């Protein structure tokens, strides 16, 4: 299939989102059991942040999966709708997804902010390049 090169990074990004979600819930269930926290005690996000400190980074990372990646999904879908892709767009999509994976690993493990920040900046740069590449195709093609 011609569009497979763009679909694979998109599917991997979706898999990353579900992986972070599963990690967060596994951490939360373990934490709630080990600390004897009843589900109702964490019925709101604010209450959860106060009591579920061990799983906060994973919860924050899950929310991150619905920020910049939304623009990634959009640019990929637009490219598919326009039936256009090139090796540069595919390369930028792989760079974005790879850096998002690294970002999630950092965020949900040792969480060194400066490491996470630089990975985030470079992933956003790759995403911006995707939009510039697609935009230039739409304007000049």
Image: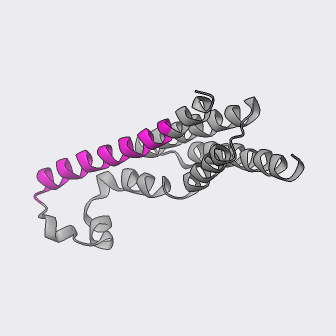
Looking at the picture, does residue 136 appear above or below residue 1?
Answer: below
- 26 w.r.t. 74: above or below: above
Looking at the image, which residue is at 49% across and 55% down?
A: 64
* Residue 123 picture quarter: top right
- The residue located at (60%, 47%) in the rendering is 114
Please name the predominant secondary structure of the magenta segment in the image. Answer: helix
- Queried whether the magenta region covers residue 121, the answer comes back as no
Left or right position of 91 against 19? right
Q: Position of residue 41 (x, y in %)?
A: 17, 70
Q: Which residues are magenta?
A: 11-36
* Residue at the far top in the pictured view: 1
Pick whichever, 89 or 24, lies toward us.
89
Quadrant in which residue 98 is drawn: top right
**Residue 23, above or below 98:** below
**Residue 59 x %, y %:** 37, 55
- Apparent side of residue 84 relative to residue 99 in the rendered image (left or right): right
In the rendered image, is residue 110 in sight?
Answer: no
Identity of the residue drawn at 31% across and 52% down: 55
Q: Nearer the viewer, residue 49 or 44?
A: 44
Please tell me which residue lies in front, 80 or 21.
Answer: 80
Quadrant of the snapshot with the N terminus: top right
x and y, in percent, of residue 91 in the image:
69, 31
- Residue 89 in the image, given as x and y percentages of width and height: 72, 37
Please give the name of the residue rendered at 56% of the width and 45% of the height, measured from the top-left corner: 116
In the image, residue 19 lies in the stretch drawn in magenta: yes
Tag count in the figure? 0
Q: Does any portion of residue 18 appear in the rendered image?
A: yes
């Amino acid at each position: 299939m011609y569009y497979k090169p763009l679909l694979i990074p998109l599917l991997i990004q979706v898999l990353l989102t579900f992986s972070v979600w599963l990690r967060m819930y596994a951490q939360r269930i373990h934490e709630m059991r080990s600390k004897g926290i009843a589900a109702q005690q964490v019925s709101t996000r604010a209450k959860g942040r106060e009591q579920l400190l061990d799983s906060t980074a994973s919860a924050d990372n899950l929310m991150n999966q619905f920020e910049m990646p939304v623009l990634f999904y959009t640019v990929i879908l637009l490219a598919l709708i326009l039936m256009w892709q090139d090796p540069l767009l595919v390369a930028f999509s792989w760079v974005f997804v790879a850096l998002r994976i690294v970002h999630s690993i950092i965020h949900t493990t040792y969480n060194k902010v400066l490491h996470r920040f630089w990975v985030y900046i470079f992933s956003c740069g790759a995403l911006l390049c995707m939009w510039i590449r697609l935009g230039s195709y739409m304007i000049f093609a």
